[in-house]
């Protein structure tokens, strides 16, 4: 059974990833900040014995190291950095929450790098050897024609560069790192008018991940596997 380590597993896309990957025969290490209140995730884990829940706040880098030590000796086929925030509502020119901007960079940009540093050995010991980070089409400089959302956009553009830069470093260890835009999804973050259901998005993401290999190193893909412009 291949093994997935997932952050932000308690709701939305993360919860649907747990459900679909576990149903597909994967062992899932599902991480969230407060497992005791993650009722839907607890229910999913109770139904499928291949799901293990871990308490992890990706804003706490020491906790990331602690989890890496706890899972020492566990081969992780896919590290999927899903946890992220949209950030403060004050994101437009003339009304920027700079403290919130720093927090968004720590969670959306720095935490995926920290996860990669902490778990590279686990991933390198696996068969599939993938580090995947959720980005957004809003991170694309080529597609940005209407401005706004400075905080969220820049934190995701920065994580694109993190994974793009990490890719050749990881390739030396046989590990493939790349970014995926999951689409505009009807979650708490995406809102009720989004194009996709979580089920539709994750079904596509799962296919992309299961087909991925060294050819995808440093790529910026969407949920259907199409290459997005930087």
Image (cartoon, rainbow, N blue to C red):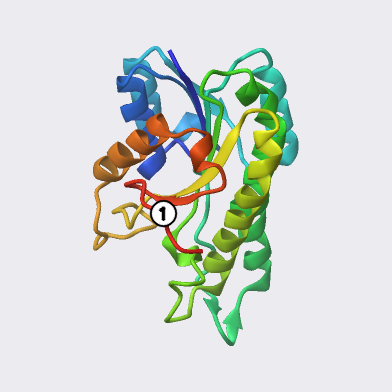
Label 1 packing within 10 angstroms: few (<14), some (14-19), many (20+): some
Q: Looking at the image, which residue is at 47% across and 72% down?
A: 142
Residue 67: where, in percent of width, then height? 66, 26
Q: Looking at the image, which residue is at 67% across and 36% down?
A: 170
Residue to which mark 1 is pinned: 227
> From what the image shows, is residue 2 above or below residue 92?
above
> From what the image shows, is residue 79 above or below residue 89?
above
Residue 53 at least partly seen: yes
Q: Nearer the viewer, residue 175 or 186?
A: 175
Q: Nearer the viewer, residue 222 or 30?
A: 222
SS at badge 1: loop
Q: Looking at the image, which residue is at 69% across and 28% down?
A: 173
Q: Is residue 57 left or right of residue 83?
A: right
Q: Is residue 103 left or right of residue 198?
A: right
What is the residue that sits farthest to the front in this orientation? 215
Q: Is residue 130 left or right of residue 64?
A: left
> From what the image shows, is residue 66 above or below residue 88?
above
Residue 74: where, in percent of width, then height? 61, 15
Q: How many discs mark residues in the rendered view?
A: 1
Residue 226: where, in percent of width, then height? 36, 51
Residue 59 at least partly seen: no
What is the residue that sits farthest to the bottom in this orientation? 94
Q: Is residue 79 left or right of residue 41?
A: right
Residue 10: where, in percent of width, then height? 43, 37
Q: Looking at the image, which residue is at 62% across and 74% down?
A: 97
Quadrant of the image containing the N terminus: top left
Q: Nearer the viewer, residue 67 or 141?
A: 141
> From what the image shows, is residue 63 above or below residue 96?
above
């Amino acid at each position: 059974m291949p093994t997935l380590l997932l952050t932000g597993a308690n709701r939305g896309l993360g919860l649907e990833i747990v459900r679909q990957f576990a149903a597909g025969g994967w062992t899932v290490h599902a991480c969230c900040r407060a497992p005791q209140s993650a009722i839907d995730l607890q229910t999913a884990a109770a139904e499928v014995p291949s799901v293990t829940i871990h308490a992890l706040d990706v804003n706490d880098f020491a906790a990331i190291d602690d989890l890496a030590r706890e899972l020492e000796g566990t081969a992780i086929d896919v590290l999927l950095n899903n946890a992220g925030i949209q950030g403060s509502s004050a994101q437009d020119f003339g009304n920027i929450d700079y403290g919130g901007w720093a927090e968004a960079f720590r969670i959306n940009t720095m935490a995926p790098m920290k996860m990669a540093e902490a778990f590279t050995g686990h991933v390198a010991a696996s068969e599939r050897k993938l580090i995947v980070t959720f980005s957004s089409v809003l991170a694309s400089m080529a597609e940005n024609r209407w401005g706004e959302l400075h905080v969220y956009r820049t934190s995701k553009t920065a994580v694109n560069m993190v994974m793009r830069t990490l890719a050749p470093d990881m390739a030396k260890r046989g590990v493939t790192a790349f970014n995926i835009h999951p689409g505009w999804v009807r979650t708490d973050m995406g809102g009720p008018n989004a194009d996709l259901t979580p089920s539709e998005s994750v079904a596509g993401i799962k296919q992309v991940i299961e087909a991925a290999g060294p050819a995808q190193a440093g790529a910026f893909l969407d949920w259907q596997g199409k290459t997005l412009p930087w």
